Image (cartoon, rainbow, N blue to C red):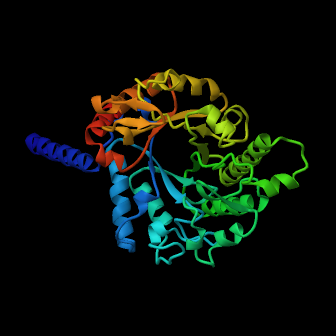
Amino acid sequence: MKRAIALVVLVCVMLSSCANETTKSPFSETPDSIIDEVRACWVTYSELDFDDKSKSGFENGINSLFKTAKDNGLNTLFVHVISHFDAYYNSKILPMSKYVAGKRGGKLDYDPLSIMCQTARKYGLKIHAWINPFRIMMSTNIDSLDKSDPAVQLLKTADASVCDEGAYLVPSSEKAQNIMLSAIREVVDNYDIDGVHFDDYFYPTTDEKFDKIQFSNYKGGLPLADYRRAAVDSFVSATYRIVKSKSKELKFGISPQANVKKNRDELYADVEKWCQTDGYIDYIMPQLYFGFEDPRTDFKFENILKTWQSIAQKCELQIGLGLYRAGEKIDSYGVKSDEWVQHSDIIARQIRVVRSAKLKGFAIFSCTSLIDKKTETENMRKEILS
């Protein structure tokens, strides 16, 4: 009898063990010390441009990308939902993006963002709506836009403008700001997201002609540079209020360029103010796409990190890491370096530095680099799970 009872107990234990094995998360081994760490990657508009534009094609593509992120120890995604005054969701304000629909303003029988939100939850990932608020197109050929496109009407007025970088909304235009704020509210109110995310697209030019009409009508007395910074400040704080009006748990953050001076003087993005004043952002995520051996002392990874640590006083500091650089020689802007060719553990070491500094987390640019940069990615993954 005792032997029979013992056999039953043993079978129950084995069945329980099997059940636990089949339901066990592939990342149950993640150390408790980093459970709350943000481990993110960006999913760009070009990565959402799948050859198969059908619902099943989009679902398969998204499933593959998001699974790749999960399999490499990441827990958060920044996905493009507005990249070129367009929408990756069923919008009443903006045309559907050509990257998901095949052509700008095309029709779909599904909602891409809904699928992305559902797939993120399937893998236990957080998802933030990545928005480029002012960019319309990276070409000056505005005649390629359909006459019914809402961008065309804005380009006929002073609310949008064309410069060498392409066509952009004018950040100091009240009408342009209101349209984009309405689109942001549309996303926040209707989708199961965890936050809103901007990168470094603000003013595209320092050319005085870009917003000449707005500035000529301005009577406040600020010089042009301060006037432009005030316009961007206003938009950022308004976005923060929209995000928080939905839920205090939703996050709003910005990923600016690493160069603080360039942000301020060329993009008119006063990142220092946002980091040191309540009511602008929850986190800052500078794009520190530099190695440890950068020939410019100020931009060596650990040095530029210290610069941002000194700035981020009233917000979380997270770091953008350039996995896309792995295996590539750098020869641009007067900088030459073979560091990313000679080493395949740069991202892993940078994660180690971020953790040693007790920062909130990091993000990888970008999702497909997790596939393309195999050796660097594997070293990164080992570090994440160490």
| Residue drawn 42% across the image and 61% down it | 48
Q: Could you tell me which quadrant the C terminus lies in?
A: top left
User: Where residue 343 sits: x, y (%)?
Assistant: 29, 29
Location of residue 184 by image quarter: bottom right
Q: Is residue 95 visible?
A: yes
User: Where residue 179 sits: x, y (%)?
Assistant: 71, 63
Asked whether, in this view, residue 305 is left or right of residue 243, the answer is: left
| Residue drawn 58% across the image and 45% down it | 200
User: Where residue 118 sits: x, y (%)?
Assistant: 45, 61
Above or below, comparing residue 43 to residue 320 in the picture: below
Above or below, comparing residue 94 to residue 2 in the picture: below
Q: Is residue 93 visible?
A: no
Above or below, comparing residue 287 to residue 71 in the picture: above
| Residue drawn 33% across the image and 30% down it | 338
Asked whether, in this view, residue 183 is left or right of residue 371, the answer is: right
Q: Nearer the viewer, residue 217 or 377?
A: 217
Q: Nearer the viewer, residue 87 or 240?
A: 87
Above or below, comparing residue 104 to residue 6 in the picture: below
Asked whether, in this view, residue 323 is left or right of residue 151, the answer is: left
Q: How many marks?
A: 0
Q: Could you tell me which quadrant the N terminus lies in?
A: top left
| Residue drawn 66% across the image and 71% down it | 152
User: Where residue 165 sits: x, y (%)?
Assistant: 58, 54
